[in-house]
Image (cartoon, rainbow, N blue to C red):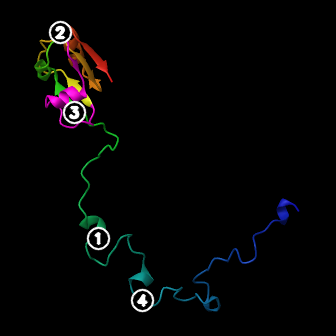
């Protein structure tokens, strides 16, 4: 057996119907389109609903883009950390107990608004550059979890 001996199984392929090729073909004259009317004469635009307001115009437009992979941080400003005493290790459970963070599971980001008067070891998921510098100027440490 060679490549030129291969052919599809019997009945696997049917010949294309050639419409409008004479009475003997069974698809002559009107070529399967019936008699008169829109569908006999012309093609219609995709989505045309006979003059009714089409679906794509009935529905409202979508508003913008939502990134599904966005990480939603619980923000805490440096000025709020003054409630802790000097030398305290500040982590998520400590922030929750003081009421600075609502969601226990959400990652925490420390932001740089305000001033810090106490030296703290702050453990959080993320820090802004200004927050990190203010914590280190106050004699503390900023540790990323």
* Residue 93 place in picture, x, y as percent: 23, 29
Q: Is residue 92 left or right of residue 117?
A: right
Numbered circle sitting on residue 74: 3
Instruction: Tell whether label 3 touches label 4 (CB within 8 Å).
Output: no
The numbered dot on residue 54 is 1
Element class at badge 4: loop
Q: Spatial distance from mark 1 to mark 4, Cα to Cα? A: 25 Å
Which mark's residue is nearer the viewer, 4 or 3?
Answer: 3
Image vertical order of residue 111 relative to residue 49, above or below: above
Q: Are marks 3 and 1 in contact (CB under 8 Å)?
A: no
Residue for point 51% across, 88% down: 30
4 vs 2, front mark: 2
Classed neighbour count for the residue bearing mark 2: other residues with Cα under 10 Å, few (<14), some (14–19), many (≥20): some
Label 1 residue SS: loop
Magenta-drawn segment: 87-107
* Left or right, residue 57 beside residue 39: left
Q: For residue 92: magenta?
A: yes
Q: Earlier in the sequence, mark 1 or mark 2?
A: 1
Task: Reply above or below: 28 against 115.
Answer: below
Q: In the structure shown, which secondary structural element does the residue marked by tag 2 occupy?
A: loop
């Amino acid at each position: 057996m060679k490549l030129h001996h291969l052919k599809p199984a019997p009945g696997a392929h049917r010949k294309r119907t050639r419409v409008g090729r004479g009475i003997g073909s069974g698809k002559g004259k009107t070529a399967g389109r019936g008699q008169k009317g829109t569908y006999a004469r012309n093609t219609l635009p995709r989505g045309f609903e006979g003059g009714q307001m089409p679906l794509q115009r009935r529905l409202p437009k979508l508003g913008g883009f939502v990134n599904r992979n966005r990480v939603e941080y619980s923000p805490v400003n440096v000025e709020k950390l003054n409630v802790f005493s000097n030398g305290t290790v500040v982590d998520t459970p400590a922030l929750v107990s003081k009421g600075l963070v609502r969601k226990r599971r959400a990652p925490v980001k420390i932001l740089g608004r305000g001033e810090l008067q106490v030296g703290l070891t702050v453990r959080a998921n993320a820090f802004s550059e200004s927050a990190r510098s203010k914590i280190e100027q106050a004699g503390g440490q900023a540790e990323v979890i």
